[in-house]
Image (tube, rainbow, N blue to C red):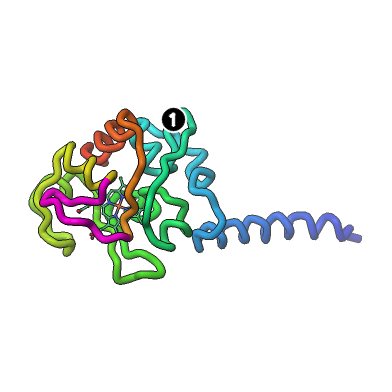
Amino acid sequence: MYSAKRIIKPVMKLTGGGLVLLLAGCGMGMDDATDYGARDFSSNGEQIYFTGRNQTGSAITYLGGTMHAQMHNRTCASCHGDDRQGQRLYPKFWVVAPPLTKHSLTEEHDDGHGDHERYDKNSLKLAISQGLDPAGSALNGAMPRWNISDSDMEDLVSFLLTDIH
Ligand code: HEC
């Protein structure tokens, strides 16, 4: 005869795992730092983009942002995507977090997101900390205004201005 324990244990394991995936999928209550915890980041800037924490473990903080930011634990990746290709936000699906590839930031491109002038290091820093585009116009409030130390900002911006592949 099979013992009940033998059957229940694996089933518990399975559903336990399923539940975690489900929660992560909804972006509720899960810490992105945990999601990406197993990954090795090649730079401090990349780590901040994915986890919202620098390599010494300090979290970057922000002002503003929407419910989306709260639900998705404030990482750049949660709104702008793992591959930095941008995406629509939930629940405000009409708001789009634009792509943040080197190409879309600094070259002619057509991502359907306005016609911003090309970004350089300084204007990128202003976009991230003050929410201003290169022409000095305010970005949509769905983009949080970030509090980042100078050196973390430098690393983050260098990461954004590096090609992904
Ligand atoms: C809650 C979602 C959200 C998060 C988190 C977020 N952003 Fe954004 N971001 C946006 C949205 C939405 C816009 C577009 C604003 C607009 O269209 O005016 C934007 C715009 C930008 C822009 C301007 C791009 C352009 O094409 O003009 C930059 C640069 C940027 N974000 C960088 C970052 C960085 C770096 C982080 C992490 C530190 C980050 N964002 C986190 C939603 C987000």
Indicate left or right for 23 with 13 as reference.
left
- Numbered label tally: 1
Report the residue at 42% width, 50% height from top.
74
Q: Please say if 59 is above or below 56.
A: below
Residue 23 vs residue 142, the one in the foreground: 142
| Snapshot quadrant of residue 15 | bottom right
Q: Is mark 1 within 8 Å of ligand 1?
A: no
At a point 32% along the width and 65% down the height, the residue shown is: 88
Residue 95 location, x and y as percent?
Answer: 29, 66
Range covered by the magenta-colored residues: 130-141
Give the percent coordinates (x, y) of residue 8: 80, 59
Q: Is residue 131 magenta?
A: yes
Residue 102 falls inside the magenta stretch:
no
* Predominant secondary structure, magenta span: loop
**Camera-nearest residue between 49 and 137:** 137
The front one of 150 and 1 is 150
Q: Residue at x 56, y 60 (%)?
A: 23
Quadrant of image for the N terminus: bottom right
Q: On the image, numbered disc 1 is attached to which residue? A: 55
Q: Please identify the quarter of the rendering in which residue 123 is found.
A: top left
- The residue type indicated by label 1 comes to Gln
User: Under tag 1, what secondary structure?
Assistant: loop
Find residue 135 and report its horizontal and vertical position in percent.
10, 51
